[in-house]
Amino acid sequence: MLTLYYAPGACSMASHIALEETGTPYETKVVGLAQGEQTKPEYLNGVNPRGKVPALKTDDGILTENVAILTYLARTFPDAKLLPSCARAASPPTSRRTKT
Ligand SMILES: N[C@@H](CCC(=O)N[C@@H](CS)C(=O)NCC(=O)O)C(=O)O
């Protein structure tokens, strides 16, 4: 099961909303930023060496950074339609060449 490390009112809200939108079951762990929990060795060594939220624990490892988490969620749960259809394609759109 996925586990989201987040802090209320922090930018981890973006990943939290997307995770909720997927409809998949998940667990949450609150990281007390004001208490400095993100600087504790357990968090730095076990979750995010950068000492930030969000972090998402998956079966394949831990993702950090909203953009990585959001992309992972969108691609893992395509039915949630978190990306426009062209961006959901298996391979990225080829770049357009313009004549000069
Ligand atoms: N670029 C990162 C930013 C992460 C970030 O700065 N998180 C803040 C909360 S919004 C944090 O964990 N701050 C704790 C600290 O710096 O001690 C992302 O988008 O995930």
Image (spheres, grey):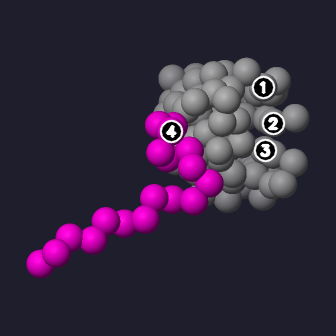
State which mark lies toward you, 1 or 4.
4
Majority secondary structure in the magenta region: loop
Which quarter shows the C terminus? bottom left
Which residue position is annotated with label 4? 85
**Mark 4–mark 3 distance (CA, rounded to whole Å):** 26 Å
State the CA–CA distance, disc 1 to disc 4: 20 Å
Q: x%, y% of residue 1?
A: 87, 35
Counting residues from the N terminus, which is met first, the one under dot 1 or under dot 3? 1
CB atoms of marks 1 and 2 within 8 Å = yes
Relative to the observer, which residue lies in front, 36 or 58?
A: 58
Q: Which residue is mark 3?
A: 57
Q: Earlier in the sequence, mark 1 or mark 4?
A: 1
Return the residue at label 1: 24
For the record, the magenta segment spans 83-100
Q: Nearer the viewer, mark 4 or mark 3?
A: 4
Which residue does the image show at 56% across and 44% down from the upper left?
A: 88
Asked which secondary structure carries label 4, the reply is helix
Which three-letter amino acid code belongs to the residue tagged 2? Leu
* Direction front: furthest residue: 99
Disc 4 marks which amino acid?
Answer: Ser
* Separation (CA) of disc 1 from disc 2: 8 Å
Reading the image, the residue beneath label 2 is 2
The answer to which of marks 4 and 3 sits earlier in the sequence is: 3
Q: What type is the residue that disc 3 sits on?
A: Lys
Would residue 27 be visible to someone looking at this image?
A: yes
Mark closest to the chain's N terminus, 4 or 2 = 2
Q: CA distance from mark 4 to mark 2?
A: 25 Å
Residue 32: % across, % down? 65, 31
Choose between 92 and 50: the one closer to the eye. Answer: 92
